[in-house]
Image (cartoon, grey):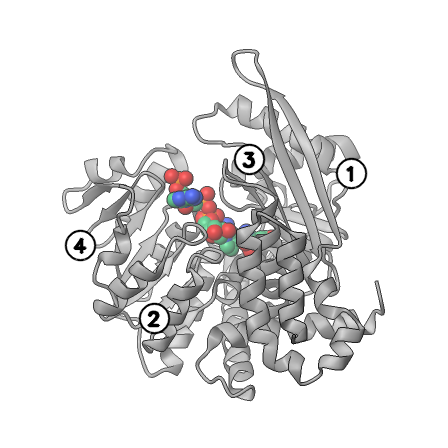
Amino acid sequence: MSYVDEVYQSVVEKNPAQPEFHQAVKEVLESLRVVIEANEEEYRRDALLERLTTPERQLLFRVPWVDDKGQVQVNNAFRVQFNSAIGPYKGGLRLHPSVNLGIIKFLGFEQIFKNSLTGLPIGGGKGGSDFDPKGKSDREVMAFCQSFMTELHKYIGADTDVPAGDIGTGAREIGYMYGQYKRLTGLYEGVLTGKGLSYGGSLARKEATGYGLLYLTEEMLKCNGKDINGMTVAVSGAGNVAIYAIQKAQQLGAKVVTCSDSTGWIYDPEGIDVELLKEIKEVKRARLSEYAAGRKSAEYHEKKNGEHGVWNVKCDVALPCATQNELDIEDAKALVANGVIAVAEGANMPTTMDATEYLQKNGVLFAPGKASNAGGVATSALEMSQNSERLSWTFEEVDKKLQGIMVNIFHNLDEAAKKYDMEGNYVAGANIAGFLKVADAMKAQGIV
Ligand code: NDP
Ligand code: 2IT
């Protein structure tokens, strides 16, 4: 059996019941096959792939907190410090009832390659909890965040591990966590990113993932002789990534006609009203049904089991920005039948593997999340730089750097794909380009 197949089989055996982790590993290893096979003996001797697919450290802990009725609640929490070959562990914290170790491992594994692609010195990590911030009072969220950080603070630091936001973790949660870290350690340091602007946050970090997604999409289209200006775009999600993806797409002259949350989706043929969406999601923390109530042109569709929602809408560009495996083979078929030109992932692994292959086979330009959503973590690294030098840069400075990073990422994966005779396969290009830097650093640092 080839080394790649052996390692994949062993990952499945050693990590039972973690399908998302298996999926993320499979996709990366399949892309790396050509690179590994060219040097199989050395990689096998050094157990490079075993080390790459095994986290350096996994922290599992309980988070007890008291709810507003005086009842004690207990959540499971995780921090997976996956790979520190090229820098301190870096990656977000997800707060969602679906969180388990396998999900955090898939996200941490993806983060290794994504962070490498940014060209910045950040290793891969991810964490989170099955706590659901939805429907909780501010005091309950604070109680959870303080208890969570009371344990986590022992394992993180500005030069060791720097968490940030992800699903369910926004400015409010980061603020409570930062306050507790500072109280426990006495350190005013850049231990978290996505902080508020009044206490060390970076301008443009809030916008960065969505804006970065559009910068990369724009470059990918341009290099394939197309212009996003005038195109119709379908977006899923209505959170941090989706909102700023919609805003930037509109600034670039596209018309965005959809968005969604976990209970339903919106079709707005006149184009999504971003200010209204922000008011509903960022301020009121309300459901999308309120969007339709506030806008005549919009249709609201309740989410039904087996229904495919936004991907049935005719569009030129599709941007999945909600969660993993939200775009499956049926969705891919509907998109192709409706003439989609490009799919770029704002979320992490939103497209199933068979859907990705179907899109690629049908000539759709496909940008994988670890490249196209890297603008968030890249700007987090810029926040770390600003914290280290105790300065803050202007919005324009950060945005310009972000744009440069995204354009650069696209060209790196395009060139890697060409070099290995897979022109246009940006999935393979991203995995290979991300891997080569990490593998080189791991080799140089010996067996650690
Ligand atoms: P938010 O919590 O701000 O928004 C998530 C959105 O997706 C919400 O609209 C939410 O709906 C919807 N959603 C979440 N889980 C599900 C689910 N299981 N089924 C259906 N809808 C769901 O998160 P972000 O925007 O930050 O993250 C979105 C994606 O982008 C994630 O995959 C994340 O890992 C990825 N990402 C985020 C980055 C960042 O900087 N924030 C950077 C790179 C990637 P509802 O409100 O109803 O829960
Ligand atoms: O998936 C991701 O890249 C993030 N959630 C952002 C991580 C970060 O450290 O900014």
**Which residue is disc 4 drawn over?**
270
Count the marks: 4
- Could you tell me if the residues under marks 4 and 1 are in contact, i.e. CB atoms within 8 Å? no
**Which residue is disc 1 drawn over?**
154
Secondary structure state at the residue bearing disc 3: loop
**On-image quarter of the N terminus:** bottom right
Label 4 vs label 1, nearer the camera: 1
Q: Earlier in the sequence, mark 3 or mark 1?
A: 3
Q: Report the front residue among 336 and 47.
A: 47
x 29%, y 39%: residue: 288
Residue 278: image quadrant is top left
Whole-percent x, y for residue 71 in the image: 57, 13
In this view, the residue farthest toward the top is 70
Label 3 vs label 4, nearer the camera: 3
Secondary structure state at the residue bearing disc 4: loop
Instruction: Look at the picture and state if 430 lies above or below 240.
Output: below
Task: Say what amino acid the circle numbered 1 marks.
Answer: Lys
Q: Which numbered dot is residue 342?
A: 2
- Could you tell me if the residues under marks 4 and 2 are in contact, i.e. CB atoms within 8 Å? no
